[in-house]
Amino acid sequence: MKNYRGAVLLMVPGIGIVLAFLVLPLANVVEESFRLFEPGRIGAAKDAPYTLFNYAELLNTNYLYYFVETARIGLIASITGLILGFPIAYFITRRLRAIWRKIAIGFLVGIMFISTLIRVYALQLTFGPTGIAKILSGLLGVSMNGRFYTELIVIFGLLHYLVPIAAITLLGTIQNINPRLSEAAQALGASRWMAHLSITVPLCIPGLLSAFLISFTLCLSAFVVPMILGKGKILFVSNLIYARFSEISNYPSGSAISIIMLVLSLAIIYGVTYVVSKRLVKY
Amino acid sequence: MAVVELKNVTKRFGGFTAVEDVTFSLGKGDILSLLGPSGCGKTTTLRMIAGFENPSEGDVLISGESMLGKRPYERNVGLLFQDYALFPHMTVQQNIAYGLKRRKFDRGALDDRVGEMLGLVKLEGLADRRPSQLSGGQQQRVALARALATSPEVVLLDEPLSALDAKLRQELRIELKQILSAVDATTIIVTHDQEEAMSLGDSLIVMNEGRIVQEGSPTDIYKNPTSRFVAEFIGRSNWFSGKLGKDGDDDLVEFSISKDISFLIHRPDHDAGAYDVCIRPERIRTEDRQDLQQISEYCNHLQGVVRDVAHLGADIHTLVELANGEMLTICQPYTGQSLRQHGERVGLAFRPSDCIVISSTT
């Protein structure tokens, strides 16, 4: 306990910064979300009365739709990202030689450093009207201006960074699984697939969980991807928040949506973590 | 009929030959140790029997049936890994039941068999524990129970005792042997540890650079190594190089290691020109000089000066320097005698039959 005071002193600047730049603005958002908004103003008046209207308003099905759509597309994209990322991670850790492994990991990390804007326009160029939109939508039997095709392109946009993130997150998990376990299972009479499904995959659950949570929270907060690739047909909650703040200057409503989003995200993270750690991970 | 038979098995990885022309067979209940330094091909041999690798040439037969192209799960082989490879997300019970489930045992038979295996390895009452809650020795027993549960035709053990500390090793070695003989398991043990190989195996195969260099009973190989590699790999040894001199009585011949130092050895069978002689440290006796002439059966006598004495508990290791500067290690059981002193002059006595003669070219 001798250095206790010293340790506290060292923490002061960090705590100060967290308070000043994180907690305080967030508290401000919470406060704003309970203020009454008068149309035409920029934000709520200083002395505006407190109200629950900004929250009550969100129960309207039109608003709920944004939340449901964000969660639905986010879920599809996250799970697809995991399904695509897992074999990549498995291949890199188990099949590649050291030098190629480094190159592959470097490539994955490299992709993540590309600006979202660039990847979005690259996808737009490739899969948009000037690209192969006609061919691809024709193959799928849908209109290239229709909702389905737009949603598909948004999911592509999300996958562009979800796949590398999922693969990188899973690298460590797979690396830590003893390859002898799968061999032991095979020696005991399990086919390769059976060994994979009954041994390797269950042991990857903690890694799959963290990869899923990272992917899903990234989807929930996605902004540029739905804005540009969604072409107004697909709007995520972030886009709604943006519209509230910058287009109609309804700060209280934007704040309320942000708070709901924050609470929902945290609830999902804790909920999923709790269920998985209690039910599935037993060792 | 042989349970396991390897016929001229060769395995190449690219341009590297890991195993070359290996042939051996095992009958029901035999325990064979494959011994060699790391990279000698013993593990590759084991993996070919288990089905994780396919031979480039030759054939692996189990119960007379060729295993070429058969996957591990299509063979009936029990495998115990060095690190046990217990499934961490399963209980002891589930670990042991894993192979039985794959072989479609029904519920009742499965429970009976798991119970039986737990009894065999003396782990009743721990069925619901997870591997992380067990000690190293207990984990090893679970791994053994898991490997034996499906009554495999052949049991493969990869360095079974190396992960355990010295005291536990001794205990588990005895237990392992009892368990293997209780189920009459045909067993192949792969190890680089000569003690493990010699104590567990009824017969021994020494491998080096992919080839079998010698096979026989542990005692036979220790007593009559046919190459310097085997003699050095198994047990400690003192080496002399020298020339054959004039003949002595019977089949004895003089072996001179320097101008004034020579002793008698048995005449080697083949005339190879140059020879190395190996004397095991425990075969040499140190004597006070005056007593030397009285012990006639130790007809070889050398003189030396004690350079180091180490008392290791049950054994005493004495380092003696000969007149030509060569050092010899002598290992004697401690029976309460007083230890030699540094700088003390001693006589060394050994029999011609204690000298292992190996042609220098091997």
Image (tube, helix red, strand yellow):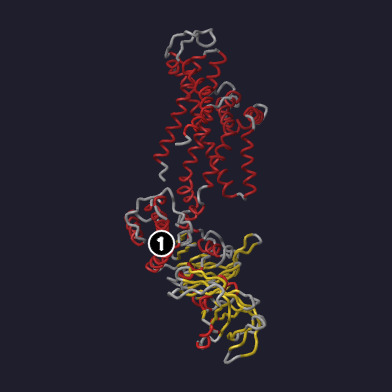
Judged left or right of residue B6, residue A104 is right
**Residue found 62% across the figure and 86% down from its top:** B254
**Residue found 53% across the figure and 19% down from its top:** A241
Judged left or right of residue A254, residue A116 is right
Q: Can you tell which quarter of the image residue B308 is in?
A: bottom right
Is the residue A27 above or below the residue A111 in the image?
Answer: above
Task: Using the image, name the chain to which the residue with label 1 belongs.
Answer: B
Return the residue nearer the eye: B212 or B112: B212
Where residue B167 sits: x, y (%)?
42, 62
Return the residue nearer the eye: B154 or B200: B200
Is the residue B167 above or below the residue B30 in the image?
Answer: above
The amino acid marked with disc number 1 is Leu
Q: Can you tell which quarter of the image residue B275 is in?
A: bottom right
Say how many tags the image has.
1
Circle 1 packing at 10 Å, graded few (<14), some (14-19), many (20+), is many
Disc 1 on helix, strand or loop? helix
Is the residue A218 above or below the residue B312 in the image?
Answer: above
Q: Is residue B315 visible?
A: yes
Q: Is residue A62 visible?
A: no
Q: Can you tell which quarter of the image residue B101 is in?
A: bottom left
In this view, the residue farthest toward the bottom is B249
Where is mark 1, residue-wise? B148
Judged left or right of residue B244, residue B301 is left
Where residue B62 sits: x, y (%)?
48, 67
